[in-house]
């Protein structure tokens, strides 16, 4: 189903639903209002008559003995006390007899039936103060107790302070001839409105969908061209509606994509440089900014191979901060991190460009000195040890003191850089065992 067809159907269904809902609500509301008005008018008339009947004689028994209620109603209507019903152009059969003629007889509790139109639309049940039926209107027998369902709308008639009777309406809406004409007119208007709404929706659907389809066709063609590789596209912007806003946004997007594509080509070298920078960051320890263990192992293997091949000296060092756990426990982990950063800075700032220094893990640091004999490496490590011990650690914490123990090994006969590092680690262990804050070498 095309977009045009969907749009037309949406307009059609929306129009029909709106007319049907408004018309249906109006129709139901009008019939209910007419029913309420007629029911209330009949109820008020019967209530006034029964109230006058009981007020005149004081009780139902006295009134029934003195004068039948039908006669009383006849006399009251003959005096013009009966409210006139709505006018009828053709003479409504519910209008009743002319004044003075009196109404026809009716069964107790029923208003006079309309002439020639069968039963009246409403019946009225009369019960005494204990809800025993006095006039059943053909629905209940006299003396029968009125059920709860009939009591909810009952109206009380009092004689003095005593409730003498209750009146309860019964019946359903039966429209008069004039009312039926009004209802028929409403129904015809509803049908006409639905028909007009359908026609209008179809016309508007054709007109609006034609313009919308044309605008969307431009966008579709431009998108296909971009998919083919031509990024710079422009479509006409017509009007200020949402489709126009979409076309304008598409043009901006096309221009931006084309410009970005050119800039991407020009920045290729920049991206490569950034990638190299990221690689460098991946081999750095985040806390001390020294190289990490993986990088040291890779580079130390290369340095060892070079030293063996060219028969050049190579010294490796492993150092450990003394009592570092005590520093963390006594002064906090934040202080321990500050110590690691400062020791890393001391080591890095006193290395040659050819030297390799890294944080090996925890509080351990490793160094590789290419082209360096054992005595020179040991002397340099002792210098570094003294610098670490003499650093003003009280500026970090008043009671803080930091020292480092180191092991140095320089015999290529160990076979690998890893083996040399293990030998240096054994020498570090000896330095720890013999008092710490010292350099052991072999």
Image (cartoon, rainbow, N blue to C red):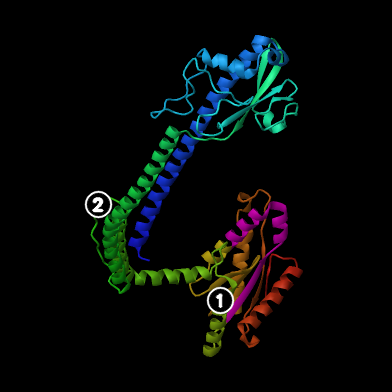
- Res 309 visible: yes
Which x, y percent locates residue 437? 69, 64
- The residue indicated by pointer 1 is 369
- Res 251 visible: no
Task: Decide if residue 139 is on the left or right side of residue 311.
Answer: right
Q: Residue at x 52, y 64 (%)?
A: 349
Task: Please identify the quarter of the rendering in which residue 1 is found.
Answer: bottom left
Mark 2 residue crowding within 10 angstroms, few (<14) / some (14–19) / many (20+): few
Say whether residue 190 is magenta.
Answer: no
Which x, y percent locates residue 376? 58, 75
Do callouts 2 and 1 mark residues in contact (Cβ within 8 Å)?
no
- The residue indicated by pointer 2 is 239
Mark 1 lies on a secondary structure that is strand
Q: Of callouts 2 and 1, which one flags the residue occurring earlier in the amino acid sequence?
A: 2
Q: Is residue 412 above or below residue 225?
A: below
Say whether residue 320 is magenta.
Answer: yes
Mark 2 lies on a secondary structure that is loop
Q: Nearer the viewer, residue 217 or 183?
A: 183
Query: Of circles 2 and 1, which is in front?
Result: 2
Which x, y percent locates residue 341? 58, 60
Task: Decide if residue 188 is on the left or right side of residue 441.
Answer: left
Q: Nearer the viewer, residue 418 or 159?
A: 159
Q: Residue at x 75, y 26 (%)?
A: 143
Which x, y percent locates residue 380? 58, 70
Task: Decide if residue 156 is on the left or right side of residue 258.
Answer: right
Q: Nearer the viewer, residue 212 or 118?
A: 118
Please report the bounds of the magenta region as a residue range. 314-343
Q: Residue at x 60, y 26 (%)?
A: 110
Q: Main secondary structure of the magenta part?
A: helix
Task: Please identify the quarter of the rendering in which residue 158 is found.
Answer: top right
């Amino acid at each position: 189903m095309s977009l045009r067809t969907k749009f037309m159907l949406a307009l059609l269904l929306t129009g029909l639903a709106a007319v049907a809902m408004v018309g249906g609500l109006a129709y139901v509301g009008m019939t209910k209002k007419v029913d309420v008005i007629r029911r209330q008018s009949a109820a008020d008339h019967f209530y006034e008559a029964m109230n006058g009947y009981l007020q005149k004689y004081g009780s139902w028994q006295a009134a029934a003995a003195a004068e039948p209620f039908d006669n009383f109603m006849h006399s009251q209507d003959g005096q013009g006390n009966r409210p006139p019903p709505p006018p009828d152009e053709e003479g409504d059969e519910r209008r009743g007899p002319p004044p003075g003629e009196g109404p026809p007889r009716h069964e107790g509790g029923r208003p006079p039936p309309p002439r020639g139109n069968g039963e009246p639309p409403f019946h009225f049940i009369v019960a005494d103060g204990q809800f025993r039926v006095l006039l059943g209107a053909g629905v209940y027998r006299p003396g029968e107790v009125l059920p709860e369902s009939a009591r909810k709308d009952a109206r009380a008639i009092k004689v003095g302070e005593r409730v003498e009777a209750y009146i309860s309406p019964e019946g359903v809406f039966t429209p008069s001839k004039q009312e039926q004409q009004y209802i028929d007119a409403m129904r015809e208007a509803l049908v006409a409105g639905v028909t007009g709404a359908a026609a209008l929706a179809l016309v508007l659907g054709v007109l609006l969908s034609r313009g919308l389809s044309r605008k969307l066709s431009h966008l579709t063609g431009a998108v296909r061209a971009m998919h083919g590789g031509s990024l710079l596209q422009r479509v006409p912007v017509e009007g200020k509606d949402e489709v126009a806003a979409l076309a304008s946004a598409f043009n901006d997007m096309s221009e931006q994509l084309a410009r970005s594509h050119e800039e991407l080509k020009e920045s290729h070298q920049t991206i490569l440089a950034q990638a190299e920078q990221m690689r460098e960051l991946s081999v750095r320890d985040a806390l001390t900014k020294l190289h990490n263990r993986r990088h040291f192992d890779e580079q130390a293997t290369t340095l060892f191979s070079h030293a063996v091949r060219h028969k050049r000296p190579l010294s490796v060092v492993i150092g450990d901060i003394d009592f570092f756990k005590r520093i963390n426990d006594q002064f906090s982990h934040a202080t321990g991190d500050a110590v690691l950063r400062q020791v890393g800075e001391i080591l890095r700032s006193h290395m040659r460009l050819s030297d390799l220094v890294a944080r090996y893990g925890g509080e351990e640091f490793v160094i590789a000195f290419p082209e360096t004999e054992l005595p020179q490496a040991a002397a340099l490590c002792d210098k570094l040890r003294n610098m670490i011990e003499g650093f003003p650690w009280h500026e970090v914490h008043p009671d803080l003191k930091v020292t480092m123990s180191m092991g140095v090994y320089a015999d290529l006969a160990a076979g690998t850089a890893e083996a040399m590092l293990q030998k240096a680690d054994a020498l570090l262990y000896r330095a720890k065992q013999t008092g710490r804050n010292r350099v052991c070498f072999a």
